[in-house]
Amino acid sequence: MPHQIDSRISATELMYAVTEQELNTLCEVAASFFQVQCCVVKIRDAGHFRIKGSSGTPEALPEPGTHYCLQVMENREPLLISELMLNEAGATGNAVVAAYAGYPLCVENQPVGVFCLTDQRPHPDFQEAGFRANLARFSALAAAVLTAAYLKMRAAARPDIFRHSPFGMLVWHMGPVMRITYVSDQARTLLGDDLFISATDSGFLSLLTPDDALAYQRILSHHRAPDTAEQELTFQLKDKPVWISQFSYPEYDTNGHLQSVYCYLLNATAQKAVEQQLERARLEMYVRLDSVAIGTWSYDPQTEIRRVSPRMAEILGFPAEELRIAQRDWVALMHPDDRAYVSAATQEELQNRQRFPHEKPRLRSVEYRIRNREGVYVWVQSGGAFIESIDTPGRFVLMGSYIDITARKQAESALNERRTLLNIIQQAQQQFMLNRDLHAAFDLMLSQLLTLLQCSLGCIALVRKDASGRLDYYLSAVLDVFGEHPHPALNGAARTSAGLESENLLSELVREGRAMYFNPPAVAQNGFPEGMPQPENYLGIPVFFNGELTGLLALANRSQGFSNETIELLSPVVLSLGALIHTRDEEEKRMQTEAQLARLAVTDTLTGILNRRGFFEKTTDFLALFRRYGTPSTMAIIDIDFFKRVNDRYGHTTGDEVLRSVAATLDSGVRDTDVVARFGGEEFVILFAATGMEQIQAVMERIRVAVASVSYEAPGRKDEFFVTISAGLAQLTTEENTVDKWIAAADVALYQAKEQGRNRVVCFMSGGAGFS
């Protein structure tokens, strides 16, 4: 089915997709062009505006009220204010924003941020003719940078999954000039090294035969109509005996405009050869049937007796002699799904012949399955007509011939199965790309596999190494069609770690590392893990990627059993499972690395507590709680008394040990909700959450005493020494309502603690009430 580009653009992904250098340059040009002090590109992420590009010093100018930027995004309209009233202007110290101009930034028609200009001076020119148009041009450039980065990141995700897929892939950009934007390695192998990225439609079509080139053009043109379904085409390369089956899927934006066409390629040369052989055989068969039928039969509706020629009897496994059988017994040999269809066709032809007895007999052909003597269904094409009896006028006998078409039906079924498998793989990979949920992709793939192969039970498991390096498996998707045997994974519960302690079919599959199956009357020594029904027949295939066992695929209870052909049929699925698991593993490694880097960026390497940057990130939450609910919080700035003497007398190694010890004492003396950070040098800071200063004063006294009680001894020296701390406390109030003011208040209290002799805790009293 055609689908749209996902409109739910993640601002977090957008922040990672765009580099600041290009946007900073654009902001510098805009600030100079409009002669303003500050130009900023802001992205709204998780309810906050993040600066992604700027010119000037945006942190030195106050925020002119986030409601202006919110108004621009919600209305999708520019906001131009040439002179703000004093009570409207944001202020920090003496800095006042007097003019504001904002323009919405959209990616794929979705607002993601604001392009804004601010200045401490009024700007009457904001209202002049032409200003709005110029602002729109600069905003369009910024939006173009964001859009290009986002689409580049998004386009890279799909090819990454198909890099290890058994199918080739082309991506067409459907602009005024159609061109190829991606060619997988498999596609290059199929099509040859003459095809390169940026090839236009004319360059690509030159690789095809003339008739196939026209057909390919019609396919691409057909996709330009809105809401078109996927298309299938088999074409031949020019001057090469290579046939390729292509399945193409259109992708539209939120306005229904065609953006790209994704083409999945499969080498169909072998299948085409089989089809050509079948066609030649069919033609030869019809030529021979002109002289003698392979199998003939007759059916008398009055006696309900059917006579079958020796050749047809032989096809069904009976002795090569004429077979006389009651019609009801013949119908019993038919496949249950075909009986009603064949009976209706027979009755319809008989009624037509009786109504128009003088017309020329009409040949009617039907195809159905019939069970031979060994219990296996074979396909036959039965053609016949009602002929009036010479002996009894008005009595009609149905006479015709049989052709065994089992081989053709099997070839058609194999082709349809491969097409369905390709669609299953494509849907599972698409499901994974949309939400990055590997288990949801497995659930979808397993459900469709059971339907395709007519199995009633199956599971997909992940294989991982435990801490000791031993392989273990985890059930990720389990499906029981009849639902009589509940299993934790069936009800959306946590994915199950089955382990290798118990002997079962899956643990055996992990140990053996090779595909295995059994059909009745053979019986497996082991069954499925506890909670799953025991199989009547079974197929297990290990999933490898680059020689490493990463997963298991198990299917069971298939009416026609399993064989080596089933294993070969499922090989593309197994390869795709391996690629999906590998892609998810690589993504998890990347996310873990990014999380580790993020932790390191806010952690002090010497003490292991937060650093200055981490401290400032935490203050945002404290300020938000205070401004919204009035929640009191207290800050303590701590300084180690005469720390320079420690370094001078005992050395920096001992000084580092003192810093680590003091940090550990501070961290152990507070709650989990509090924040401890190294502010710089021998200075530390603590944020006490939701607690007033009077309560914290007693806490800091206990911490001060705890620090002073720790003794230290420098290496190579026998004399021990102690250190003390001084602390200044300040509570977040309506007066100290910014980070800078809050820090300044606590710093003043710390200064007083040092002035009063150090080794003490001093509180800053708001409103000029002094210190305590």
Image (cartoon, grey):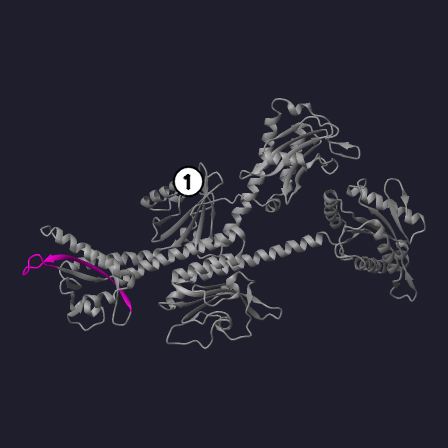
The percent position of residue 181, horizontal first and vertical second, equals 48, 44
Q: Quadrant of residue 498?
A: bottom right
Classify mark 1: residues with Cα within 10 Å, few (<14), some (14-19) or many (20+): some
The percent position of residue 394, horizontal first and vertical second, equals 8, 56
Given the current orientation, which residue lies at the most extreme right position? 757
Given the current orientation, which residue lies at the most extreme bottom position? 525
Helix, strand or loop at disc 1?
A: loop
Given the current orientation, which residue lies at the most extreme top position? 129
Within the magenta stretch, is there residue 718? no
Say left or right for 80 vs 197: right
Chief secondary structure of the magenta span? strand
- The answer to which of 375 and 411 lies nearer the viewer is 375
Task: Mark yes or no: residue 261 visible.
Answer: yes
Say left or right for 393 vs 124: left
Task: Mark yes or no: residue 682 visible.
Answer: no
Residue at left offset 5%, top offset 61%: 391
User: What range of the chain is rendered magenta?
Assistant: 376-396
Within the magenta stretch, is there residue 384? yes
- The answer to which of 420 and 147 lies nearer the viewer is 420
> In the displayed structure, would residue 320 be above or below residue 298?
below
> In the displayed structure, would residue 418 be above or below residue 753?
below
The percent position of residue 260, horizontal first and vertical second, equals 46, 43
Provide the residue designation for mark 1. 226
The percent position of residue 538, horizontal first and vertical second, equals 42, 70
Residue at left offset 77%, top offset 41%: 738
